[in-house]
Image (tube, rainbow, N blue to C red):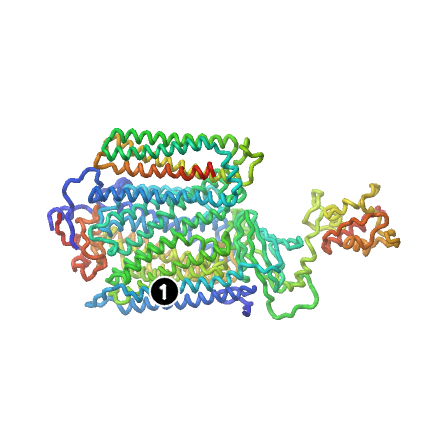
């Protein structure tokens, strides 16, 4: 090891290099930006979960339990808006992407570090507007702010729409940054064939957000204009077209929702490789499928307009286009299973989340087939079935993927582990609670329970009660997981540098990494999954803070 | 896996620490700017889609609405926009040649033309407003040109017109802000024959800002 | 296909002709989903357990495995094709209403359903429909988007304000009770429910709990009748008008047939040609004030008593008995039985009070 490298070894990590709140708010280190996003996202995740508890208390029984109908409406609208726009949308690119994409391409940082900061500030401004909206009696216009209902809603809906526009602008900047980083910042030797699947996935998510978010932003700005100065583009009483709003909104939001699932797939692929100690089967096909999902996501918006606003033929076309995602989805799941076969599999918490995502994603995908086959889809649209399918996709596959990623990379991000037993208990509670809460909703929807139903017929009572109990377990699981991860930060013992024995590049860095990610400039002589080429030192989970890489100064 | 030690040789101060080489920094900036332009096309795409939907639905209202706009003021704004884009290009050219003074001069002119563009658009908007040609709920037309009475859905034309003009004006303001920032840096002497990335990127973006109007003008004014 | 008229574990009763079609696709999807889910989970658990980490055993290198990739792509394509084509057939049937459908107008607003039968008979939050006859609903919304959703019929259609949308269904008869030979307008075979499938809020009273839970309680009872019973129900016609508190005529409230007849006399334009007041000039047609009970000479030279039978006949078929000295110009005005009865009662009342 050269003296230069040894000197850099003494550098403090990114967390302790500078102190004080100001140093965080002004830092251009993408890892710090990612941590700021993470703090905000987990806070809103907790808030959204608590709102869900209130909703499930109300719908545990028919009639009024504790909320008025309009209070219920505002709570479910805010629950949806917070969970989608403040938690799910930034979760993968802004937290895991900003932190790990540069590390996994062997770069010192993002291509545009200051742009990431601007992105976070826009997100924060959007989040503040969402809070202002909540203070202004919230919005009861559902999370989709559908016209013309949202035109009749109060000022809260206007402020919320403006907040969503800012979050969308923030997504554009985050996505742009990641695309350029992947394309231009890769370390020598890291060509696209070797690119880690997580990076492929983040590239796919970024392409989605880069080109879908501007449409969402423009739509939200037009909605704000419609509500404040009565522009007349959407309001039917002024000659506008509410169906136009639906098209624009879903053109932007449908890909973004699919993008969160792509993010989860990216994380799961990474976890599977590490915990089976082998490359994901059909690497090229999985990578291609992630990109294919991103592209197909742009053709799927019409499926949200079944039984309204679409002609018969348009419905058939969108049914076919929507169904096409089944091909890459099947390729990915089949290869995940093939990865397990022949692996050397360990079952620590991240792996449990990865396996959980396989189950949830399978159910989500199959449920969406029901919705995309028009004969059944028209019947089930807008029901609790549709809501359950959406929850399996977002609250299931996407959020479990995100939490799995957090558990996987937590030691790298913060240099501290967490209590493995409690973390597994958290997963069990989440998984059982989630399925109990939403499998029942499939049955309720099939039996004709409309979505967003404050009240319901007596024969839905039993299933609603089971669903609520599942929901409470789910939220208890969320809180347990947050507490376990938080307590992990306070652990005295430092996490090992490579606790899972992964061959992927980011584990070559110290835990937590230094500001420049790596103490040395990396030259990729092996792929991120070449377990047979990786040295024992690289794969060791010893708590060494020394870089395991052989440092050969080259010029 | 091997590793290179951090290059200890002094790099130029304009080379950001995350980059290895000037070429890498330049290419990253260029790709980033192009991607930004590409996403902006989708941003305006939302309004152009609205235009298309209503135009197909109410062609006569769009014809009648377009008739009310002042083609000469609009045409002037188009010429100003094209001139502004040209000035941006001249600034980039001067930067490449290392002529610092000219960079600042052309940037300044482009910036002023941007402001002039906004003023011209504002004049036309004011003319519409004074005749009650306002969108949606504020529609109260007076002194219509070439029409005895308003055509149904004419207010929707003005809804699209104001949406397009409004979003574009916001975007122009953003472009002006970008130019102004580069102008300040140019005056500080940040650019040289070796490094003019920000000028080129601002110029590239500025050209797009102006180009949007090349599409919007005929759709709104000439139909 | 036989209809299952009782709800099953997962699906409501099949009370329309398309319900069995929808359900067979639902069940096909459901069972293949169960099989696929179980297979995926079983494979996952089996592999995970079989290849659990053991000391000294390394992971096998993974490869491209072309047959697996091709198989996965073909499998995915099969899912697409099968779902698309099976989801298509039933949908096309459901999308196209038969030509001989009974058309009922539906107006939705937050939070009520208004129905108008072809003859103008209106109902609110309930509607009578015939069994075994296709019914087409032509729907519009007065405020926000709603969706007409009848789980038992497996139909749903969103109603966007500013445009019309339509949906159709054919309700089946439930049970085996043979069609009754007599006709009873109020006899209902069974009732089901339409709810609102599109969130439409509840900007109601914050504090007081009312039966109106907004969107969740926006529902209408659908009463399915034998066809002839339905015809009889509709033939009763729209509700008769009454004098409202402000003196004008309108729908609402209860009143005598005579009072309704008075309203109809004006609204159906009888008063344009027939004088109904004392000491006022005669109009185009015979004065009806004080006519009841007298003898009326006819154009064919005969005489007829002005009684219920004559008045009713003259309203329904004006040309059959023309009063002497008057032109044969009276049009046939479409009226329901109840309206005719009300008019007759009114005309009977037109005489000096004693």
Front residue of A436 and B96: B96
Quick one: quadrant of the N terminus of chain C?
Answer: bottom right
Helix, strand or loop at label 1? It is helix
Q: Residue at x 67, y 54 (%)?
A: C119
Q: Residues within 10 Å of mark 1 (few under 14, many from 20)?
A: some
Q: Position of residue A390 (x, y in %)?
A: 42, 56
Q: Position of residue A376 (x, y in %)?
A: 48, 61
Q: Is residue B92 visible?
A: yes
Which residue shows up at 31% across the image and 35% down it?
B89
Q: How many numbered marks appear?
A: 1
Residue A66 percent location from the top left of the image: 48, 52
Query: Which of the 4 image quadrants contains residue B76?
Result: top left
The front one of A175 and B144 is: B144
Q: Which residue is mark 1?
A: C74
Q: Is residue B105 left or right of residue C347?
A: left
As displayed, is residue C333 above or below residue A370? Answer: above
Residue nearer the viewer, C184 or A68: C184
A176 sits left or right of C343 in the view: left
Left or right of A481 in this view: C18: right
Residue A146, horizontal then vertical, whole percent: 47, 48
Q: Is residue A160 visible?
A: no
State which chain disc 1 sits on: C
């Amino acid at each position: 090891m050269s003296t230069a490298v040894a000197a850099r070894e003494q550098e403090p990590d990114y967390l302790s290099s500078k102190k004080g709140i100001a140093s965080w708010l002004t830092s251009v280190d993408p890892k710090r930006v990612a941590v700021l996003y993470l703090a905000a996202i987990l806070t809103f995740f907790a808030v959204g979960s608590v709102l869900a508890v209130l909703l499930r208390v109300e719908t545990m029984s028919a009639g009024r339990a504790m909320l008025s109908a309009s209070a219920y409406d505002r709570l479910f609208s805010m629950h949806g808006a917070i969970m989608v726009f403040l938690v799910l949308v930034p979760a993968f690119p802004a937290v895991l992407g900003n932190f790990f994409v540069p590390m996994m391409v062997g770069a010192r940082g993002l291509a545009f570090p200051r742009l990431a900061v601007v992105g976070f500030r826009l997100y924060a401004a959007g989040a503040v507007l969402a809070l202002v909206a909540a203070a202004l009696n919230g919005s009861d216009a559902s999370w989709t702010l559908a016209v013309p209902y949202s035109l009749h809603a109060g000022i809260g809906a206007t402020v919320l729409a403006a907040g969503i526009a800012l979050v969308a602008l923030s997504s554009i900047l985050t996505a742009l940054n990641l695309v350029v980083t992947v394309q231009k910042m890769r370390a020598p030797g890291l060509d696209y064939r070797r690119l880690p699947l997580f990076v492929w996935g983040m590239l796919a998510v970024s392409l989605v957000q880069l080109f879908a978010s501007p449409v969402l932003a423009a739509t939200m700005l037009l909605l704000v204009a419609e509500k404040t100065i009565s522009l007349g583009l959407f309001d039917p009483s002024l000659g506008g077209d509410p169906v136009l709003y639906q098209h624009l909104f879903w053109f932007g939001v449908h890909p973004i929702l699919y993008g969160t699932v792509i993010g989860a797939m990216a994380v799961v692929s990474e976890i599977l490789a590490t915990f089976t100690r082998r490359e994901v089967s059909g690497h090229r096909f999985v990578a291609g499928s992630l990109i294919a999902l991103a592209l197909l996501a742009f053709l799927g918006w019409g499926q949200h307009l079944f039984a309204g606003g679409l002609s018969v033929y348009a419905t058939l076309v969108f049914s076919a286009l929507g169904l096409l995602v089944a091909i890459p989805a099947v390729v990915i799941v089949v290869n995940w299973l093939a990865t397990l076969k022949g692996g050397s599999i360990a079952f620590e918490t991240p792996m449990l989340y990865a396996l959980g995502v396989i189950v949830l994603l399978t159910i989500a995908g199959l449920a969406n087939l029901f919705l995309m086959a028009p004969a059944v889809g028209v019947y089930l649209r807008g029901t609790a079935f549709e809501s359950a399918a959406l929850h399996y996709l977002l609250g299931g596959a996407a959020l479990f993927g995100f939490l799995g990623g957090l558990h996987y990379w937590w030691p790298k991000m913060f240099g501290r582990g967490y209590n493995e037993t409690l973390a597994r208990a958290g997963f069990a509670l989440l998984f059982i609670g989630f399925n109990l809460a939403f499998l029942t909703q499939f049955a309720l929807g099939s039996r004709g329970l409309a979505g967003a139903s404050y009240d319901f017929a007596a024969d839905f009572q039993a299933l609603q009660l089971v669903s609520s109990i599942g929901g409470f377990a789910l939220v208890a699981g969320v809180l347990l997981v947050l507490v376990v991860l938080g307590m992990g930060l306070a652990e005295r013992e430092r996490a090992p540098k490579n606790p899972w024995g992964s061959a992927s590049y980011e584990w070559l860095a110290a835990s937590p990494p230094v500001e420049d990610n790596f103490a040395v400039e990396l030259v990729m002589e092996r792929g991120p999954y070449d377990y047979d080429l990786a040295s024992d030192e690289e794969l060791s989970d010893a708590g060494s803070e020394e870089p395991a890489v052989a440092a050969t100064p080259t010029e | 896996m091997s590793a290179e030690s951090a290059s200890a040789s002094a790099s130029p101060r304009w080379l950001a620490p995350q980059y290895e080489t000037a070429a890498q920094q330049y290419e990253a900036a260029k790709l980033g700017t192009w991607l930004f332009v590409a996403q902006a096309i989708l941003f305006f795409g939302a309004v152009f889609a609205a235009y298309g939907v209503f135009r197909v639905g109410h062609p006569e209202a769009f014809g009648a609405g377009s008739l009310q706009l002042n083609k000469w003021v609009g045409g002037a704004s188009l010429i100003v926009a094209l001139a502004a884009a040209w000035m941006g290009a001249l600034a980039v050219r001067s930067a490449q040649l290392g002529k610092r003074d000219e960079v600042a001069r052309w940037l300044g002119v482009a910036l002023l033309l941007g402001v002039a563009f906004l003023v011209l658009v504002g004049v036309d908007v004011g003319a519409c407003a004074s005749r009650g040609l306002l969108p949606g709920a504020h529609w109260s037309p007076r002194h219509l040109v070439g029409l005895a009475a308003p055509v149904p859905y004419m207010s929707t034309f003005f809804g699209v017109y104001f949406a397009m003009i409004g979003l574009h004006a916001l975007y122009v303001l953003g472009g002006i802000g970008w130019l102004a920032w580069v102008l300040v840096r140019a005056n500080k002497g940040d650019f040289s024959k070796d490094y003019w990335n920000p000028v080129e990127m601002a110029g590239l973006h500025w050209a797009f800002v102006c180009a949007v109007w090349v599409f919007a003008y005929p759709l709104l004014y000439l139909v | 296909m036989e209809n299952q008229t009782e709800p099953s574990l997962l699906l409501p009763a099949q009370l329309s002709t398309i319900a069995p079609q929808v359900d067979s696709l639902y069940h096909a999807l459901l069972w293949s989903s169960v099989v696929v889910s179980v297979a995926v989970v079983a494979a996952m658990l089996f592999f995970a357990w079989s290849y659990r980490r053991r000391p000294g055993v390394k992971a096998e290198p993974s490869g491209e495995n072309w047959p697996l990739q091709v198989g996965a792509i073909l499998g995915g394509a099969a899912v697409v094709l099968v779902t698309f084509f099976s989801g298509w057939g039933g949908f096309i049937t459901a999308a196209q209403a038969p030509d001989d459908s009974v058309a009922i107008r539906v107006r939705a607003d937050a939070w009520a359903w208004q129905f108008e039968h072809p003859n103008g008979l209106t109902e609110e939050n309930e509607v009578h429909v015939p069994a075994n006859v296709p019914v087409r609903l032509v729907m519009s919304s007065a405020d926000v988007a709603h969706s007409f959703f009848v789980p038992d019929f497996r139909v749903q259609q969103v109603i966007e304000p500013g445009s019309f949308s339509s949906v159709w269904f054919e309700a089946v008869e439930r049970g085996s009770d043979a069609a009754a030979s007599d006709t009873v307008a109020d006899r209902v075979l069974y009732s089901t429910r339409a709810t609102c499938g599109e969130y439409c809020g509840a900007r109601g009273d914050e504090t007081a709990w009312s039966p109106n839970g907004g969107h969740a309680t926006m529902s209408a009872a659908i009463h399915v009748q034998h066809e002839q019973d339905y015809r009889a129900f509709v033939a009763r016609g729209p509700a008769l008008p009454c004098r409202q508190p402000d003196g004008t005529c309108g729908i609402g409230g209860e009143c005598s047939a005579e009072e309704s007849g008075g309203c109809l006399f004006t609204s159906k334009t009888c008063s344009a040609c027939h004088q109904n007041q004392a000491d006022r000039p005669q109009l185009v047609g015979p004065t009806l004030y004080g006519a009841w009970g007298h003898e009326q000479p006819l154009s064919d030279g005969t005489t007829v008593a002005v009684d219920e039978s004559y008045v009713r006949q003259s309203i329904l078929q004006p040309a059959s008995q023309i009063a002497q000295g008057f032109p044969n110009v009276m049009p046939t005005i479409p009226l329901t039985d109840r309206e005719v009865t009300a008019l007759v009662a009114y005309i009977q009342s037109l005489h000096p009070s004693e």
